[in-house]
Image (cartoon, helix red, strand yellow):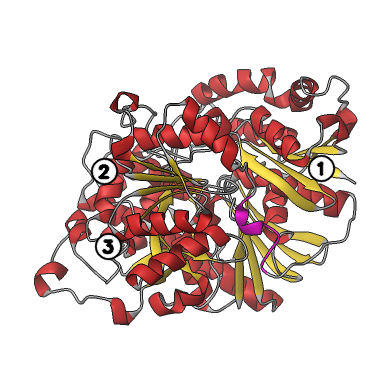
Amino acid sequence: MTYILGISALYHDSAAALLRDGEIVAAAQEERFSRRKHDPGFPELAIEYVLQESGISLAEVDNVVFYDKPFLKFERLIETYIAVAPKGFNSFRMAMPVWLREKLFLKDLLAKQLRKMDPDFTVDKLLFAEHHVSHAASAFYPSPFEEAIVLTVDGVGEWATTTVGVGRGNELTMLKELHFPHSLGLLYSAFTYYTGFKVNSGEYKVMGLAPYGDPKYKDLILEHLVDLKEDGSFRLNQKYFNYTSGLTMTSKALEDLFGHPVRKPETDQLTQFHMDIAASVQAVTEEIMLRITRDLAREHGIRNLCMAGGVALNCVANGKILRDGAFDNLWVQPAAGDAGGALGAAYAAWHQELKKPRKVEQGDQMRGAYLGPKYEDGDIARELTEVGAKFTTYENGEMIGETAQALADGKAVGWFQGRMEFGPRALGARSILGDPRSESMQKTLNLKVKYRESFRPFAPSVLREDVAEWFELDGDSPYMLIVADVQDRIRRQMTDEENALFGIEKLNVKRSEIPAVTHVDYSARIQTVHEQTNPQYHALISRFKELTGCSLVVNTSFNVRGEPIVCTPTDAFRCFMGTDIEVLAIGNCLLRKEDQDPSLKENYETKYELD
């Protein structure tokens, strides 16, 4: 057997992934074990986990592959600093010591870390894949397509910010790329910064805020900031940005153009202006992505599209690409960001370096993205007892029934079952669930459970066989990466008075029979639940459907704002006791809040640094 370990590390969202003869054994982000959100450190704990899952030691691994080429990235930094000099000295002064001490000599650093696990580890086992090759490999090789166009879009790798390739069988050929500083990911991050959210963390907040606004600044952005061509290629006017030479994303010129300063996080209120800006950059992003994908479909005549990179997590744009029809089929890597680069690096080594054949599977090779740790019922009970939890154990059918009834009664439920998800989304293994029919559920979960902004939307998890009954989608969306509208039959028409509302005032207006998952523009970020990949979750929703006639539930990640998604039973219990979650279903153990020792309650509202 051949084992290949992929690693992403030292920037953000470090992770490890392990292939055995080309098949995924396990993959996980370091943050889930270290409990540090977006942990950029060497993924020692994630590596330990994936090796343990396979039952091998590091000595038995044939190759370790890093998802980046540090010398190329260093070249880009040096050339950029020279190009903008004497501006950018402060940024140069801060970056260089880290590069000269660690990142430039990454091979030695990685070997040193790996020798802690295997004293005999040798550097000849180390391979390096280019950043966007890692993304592209993560998108194509596990996909269900024999042939596909592969599009990767993110902030920046070494030089590339957008790449296009063609995958056929086990071959992945990169055809063209767009280079730094012209980056759609950095454009979106600049507006994330401008609207007062955290870069590399808050971009999805901008996407969630956009439907409350009007894209009135779209033309202004395209006129001054983005020189956009018909094929989707573009150049960014660096006059309005500061990421090449400074310590901020935007410049004073951008503030002057829009007539507002950068919003101060947590202190300045979100206004209609910020919602309109969010709507505008989202509209520009969609325009760019649609031009790129239409041109690629025309040029190559291939009907399948695979995507990865941070921008591929923009599920609103993904939904529009799918509905546009330039491609018949779309598959997005669920861990599309840097964490997924670990998996892509391993795939690149297996298929491109070792020339191994590729097996195409119906669905895909990601196993629903359930690639993390699983805990047996006995271990769960022991761990819960050690932390002082009070629980009742049930047979599986009883557990499903009790949990479904709690949901039907309007309770917020923590759901911890099976293997943890790989990637940023909770997909019914480490989730907080609720009743989508409740008009107050979105606000309750945001403010009392998640301790986060009230506008943040929630996703529906819907039985795959019933998705078309509720949404204008009749296909798979297992990874919550497609947005579609709710069906007309369940929409509620707005009154003239309600239509006249602005911004966040729209939040509390019921828009459909499933208001907790229906956004203000009648859309929803859909997860289709498949019996083959998650039979337990499918059984729960099926039981909820028997009780209520509703074949979907509210699904949000099992964590609070700023906390990584829970990994262990202890993590789950602590989050349960630190929030207003009322019921916790963990393995075959059911916990009710009223049964717990009040002295075990924690203050989770301020426990984690806000993201």
- What residue sits right under mark 2 in the picture? 447
Is residue 54 something one can see in this rendering?
yes
Is residue 277 toward the left or the right of residue 339 in the image? left
Question: Which is more toward the observer, 256 or 107?
Answer: 107
Residue 4's mark?
1
Question: Which is more toward the observer, 574 or 527?
Answer: 574
Residue 50, above or below 87? below
Callout 1 secondary element: strand
Report the mark closest to the observer, 3 or 1: 1
- Magenta residues (range): 363-370
- What residue sits right under mark 3 in the picture? 214
Q: Position of residue 376 (x, y in %)?
A: 61, 42
Task: Identify which amino acid the numbered label 2 is placed on.
Answer: Leu
Q: Name which residue lies at 57% across and 31% down.
A: 33
Q: Earlier in the sequence, mark 3 or mark 1?
A: 1
Callout 3 secondary element: loop
Is residue 224 something one can see in this rendering?
no
Q: Position of residue 169 (x, y in %)?
A: 82, 67
SS majority, magenta: loop
Residue 594 image-quadrant placement: top left
Task: Identify which amino acid the numbered label 1 is placed on.
Answer: Ile
Is residue 74 toward the left or the right of residue 396 in the image? right
- Measured in 3D between alpha carbons, the distance from the residue under mark 2 to the one under mark 1, in whole angstroms, is 43 Å
Task: Identify which amino acid the numbered label 3 is placed on.
Answer: Asp
Residue 460, above or below 93? below
Q: Position of residue 254 (x, y in %)?
A: 35, 44
Q: Position of residue 177 (x, y in %)?
A: 67, 56
